[in-house]
Image (spheres, grey):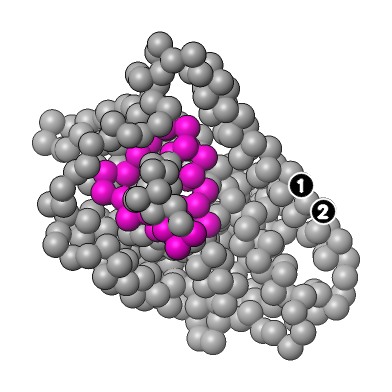
Amino acid sequence: QRAQPSPSGTSGRVGELAGDSGADMRLALLVFTVAAHETWAMLHLSLLFRTNTIMSGNPKVNQGGHTKATIFMQSKEILKPQVLSSLAAVGATAGPLVDAIHNQALLVYDVLPWSLTLFAAAPTAKTSALIPPLLAMAYLLLGGVLPAATEALFSLLPLFDNRPFSSPAGSPAQRAMYAVCSTLLIIKASELLQMSPVQPAEASNILFIACMVQWFLCDRTISSLALALIVSVGGPVAELPFTFLGCWHYISPDYWPLAFAGFGPDSGSTWAGLSCITSPCYFAVTNDAIALGRFFAVATTKHEQQQS
């Protein structure tokens, strides 16, 4: 297992801030950061609802559709409140348990740490009280809002067809199951690779191959691939406000991707200490959330049809 550097350089931990005159300011910044993430998501969601309403009356956009109706739902189906609330519920409950699969080897939570043992023979799952609301919002965005935005954007591109080049096998429920199971395997593999002699960059490449297989089996649309690739970089970067405020720190950081901008281990910027092995994990979670969102959309539509 890789050497574990001392976390004494991590800034902003609550325990160390007890006698710090700047404690109140940093805690206020933490609350502001979480509130800003939530506010941005809600504004983005409201804009998506407005865009979807406009597009639903545009025959040019709707003509023929940009996905196969038997496989994928239109953005207005994915953005239904029932679908978004289901995604948020999965993120808040199952999300921390999935995250705990590999975070024992990757990071330490410094703010509101929380341990949970499901049964006597199971290892203790370590997380933070911050994680359920953050993952609830993450799944809502990754499984509902952002896929709808990406599909809407791609549908406006001339001569672009976002339909999968071949249909993935199985029903939406089966594809969601494939996505969830493969995400669990990828995240578990990230833990094993993190504890092995394999270099982080090589481990990340191995995991990305698995992620591409996951995308091929569960999705095969260019819009989902593009979104997953963006999130594989944007997801780790989105952690920076929380590492800066000392909410958590990585045990063996390689400072990806900010090392390329001069914020490497020699810069003294401990808040930039991320790990590149999380990048493919964000890719897999995005595939997972998209598949779940489409399954919830199909189930919601069927339920509404039965009620009517």
Is 130 or 197 nearer to us in this picture? 197
Is 123 situated left or right of 128 in this image? left
Q: Residues within 10 Å of mark 1 (few under 14, many from 20)?
A: few
Secondary structure beneath dot 2 equals helix
| Tag 2 residue | 50
Residue 232 x %, y %:
47, 62
* Residue 38 counted in the magenta span: no
The front one of 254 and 287 is 254
Determine the image quadrant of residue 34.
top right
The residue range painted magenta reads 234-261
Q: Is residue 238 above or below residue 147?
A: above
- The tally of labels here is 2
**Between marks 2 and 1, how big is the CA–CA gap?**
6 Å
Q: Amino acid at mark 1?
A: Ser
Residue 71, can we see it?
Answer: no
Residue 129 on image: x %, y %: 41, 28
- Relative to 85, residue 60 above or below: below
Is 218 situated left or right of 303 in this image? left
Q: Residues within 10 Å of mark 2 (few under 14, many from 20)?
A: few
Residue 236 is inside the magenta segment: yes
Residue 70 image offset from top left, x and y in percent: 59, 74
Residue position marked by numbered label 1 in the rendering: 46
Element type where label 1 sits in the image:
helix
Above/below status of 265 relative to 137: below
Q: Nearer the viewer, residue 11 or 108?
A: 11
| Vertical side of 82 occupied by 196: above or below | below
